[in-house]
């Protein structure tokens, strides 16, 4: 009998991860497709490979015996494919996001993408949401992960979290009659929201520090010189959250959206589909405390 390499790969991946859902992510396939591959493989070799009990997956005796051979066969297959593909260009993905989300969310997402597709090349564009969405609309970006998606761009909301007033725990700067603020430079939607919220509450403020980077904002807050408004997930243990009991009105939530070019026409194995699937999985599995 001949063994199909896609069925072999599905078998090895499920066996190593002990999970159909995690295997589907690594294989960049929907879970039902992975299950069908396993079923066809079991029918082809006339052997049951997995036992499913109480939500857990384990190998049968036949599965345990087959696994080392399957790993060797795939290794030879992958080595041959790599030899043939060395002269081919790597996949390049142009990603647009904010400086904040690049520092907070992208590292684990990119690591998972690289594990699945080692030849993936990333071109990262960071900026304020209006500029990022404009670049996407002009065709200069393949995929966007940021807030404030325009109504005319098809997207999906992956994550919602509060925008939070913060200051250093070691400082009483938040009690100042005129609040010193550390904000992003003009063009940032978070800056506009923070300023409008304070103005509506008739709370005096002065912008004493401006930065184009998240690291710059966090440095200003850590120094104790200013209050700022940051995404809740970027808060550090040295920061104190401020709310209405401190005289700071609620800022509301940030909605982080995902969009990628011609997403309805992409193949399941495209670089954009890979990033989108990984991003969906990442935000879906964030701890409850990381969500609004």
Image (cartoon, rainbow, N blue to C red):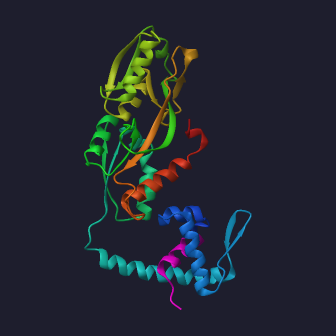
Magenta residues (range): 1-15
Which residue sits at x=55%, y=40%? Answer: 290
Q: Please, what is the dominant secondary structure of the magenta stretch?
A: helix
Q: Position of residue 280 (x, y in %)?
A: 49, 51
Q: Position of residue 249 (x, y in %)?
A: 51, 18
**Res 43 seen here:** yes
**Res 225 seen here:** no
The residue most toward the right is: 54
Q: Position of residue 4 (x, y in %)?
A: 49, 82
Q: Check the picture and name the quadrant holding the C terminus.
A: top right
In the figure, residue 214 lies in which quadrant?
top left
- Total tally of numbered discs in the picture: 0
Which residue sits at x=61%, y=65%? Answer: 19
Which residue sits at x=47%, y=12%? Answer: 201
Q: Position of residue 157 (x, y in %)?
A: 47, 42
Say above or below: 221 vs 279: above
Which residue sits at x=53%, y=92%? Answer: 1
Asked whether, in this view, residue 59 is left or right of residue 165, the answer is: right
Say above or below: 8 vs 57: below
Is 157 magenta? The answer is no
Front-lying residue, 47 or 82: 47
Say above or below: 217 vs 19: above
Asked whether, in this view, residue 133 is left or right of residue 75, the answer is: left
Front-lying residue, 103 or 196: 196
Front-lying residue, 110 or 27: 27
In the figure, residue 256 lies in which quadrant?
top left
């Amino acid at each position: 009998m001949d063994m199909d390499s896609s069925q072999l790969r599905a078998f090895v991946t499920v066996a190593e991860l002990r999970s159909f859902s995690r295997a589907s992510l690594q294989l960049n396939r929907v879970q039902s497709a992975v299950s069908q591959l396993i079923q066809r493989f079991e029918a082809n070799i006339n052997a049951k490979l997995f036992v499913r009990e109480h939500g857990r997956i384990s190998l049968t005796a036949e599965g345990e015996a087959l696994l080392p051979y399957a790993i060797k066969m795939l290794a030879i297959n992958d080595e041959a494919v790599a030899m043939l593909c060395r002269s081919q260009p790597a996949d390049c993905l142009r990603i647009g996001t904010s400086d904040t989300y690049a520092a907070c969310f992208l590292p684990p997402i990119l690591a998972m993408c690289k594990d699945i597709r080692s030849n993936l090349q990333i071109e990262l564009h960071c900026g304020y949401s209006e500029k990022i969405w404009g670049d996407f609309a002009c065709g200069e970006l393949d995929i966007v992960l940021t807030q404030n998606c325009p109504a005319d761009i098809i997207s999906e909301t992956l994550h919602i979290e509060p925008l939070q007033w913060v200051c250093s725990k070691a400082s009483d700067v938040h009690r100042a009659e005129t609040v010193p603020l550390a904000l992003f430079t003009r063009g940032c939607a978070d800056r506009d929201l923070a300023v409008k919220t304070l103005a509506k509450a008739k709370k005096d403020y002065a912008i004493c520090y401006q930065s184009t980077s998240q690291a710059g904002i966090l440095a200003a807050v850590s120094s104790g010189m200013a209050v700022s408004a940051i995404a809740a997930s970027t808060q550090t243990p040295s920061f104190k959250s401020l709310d209405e009991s401190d005289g700071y009105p609620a800022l509301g939530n940030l909605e982080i959206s995902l969009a990628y070019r011609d997403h309805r026409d992409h193949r399941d194995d495209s670089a954009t589909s890979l990033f989108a699937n990984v991003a969906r999985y990442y935000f879906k599995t964030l701890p409850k405390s990381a969500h609004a």
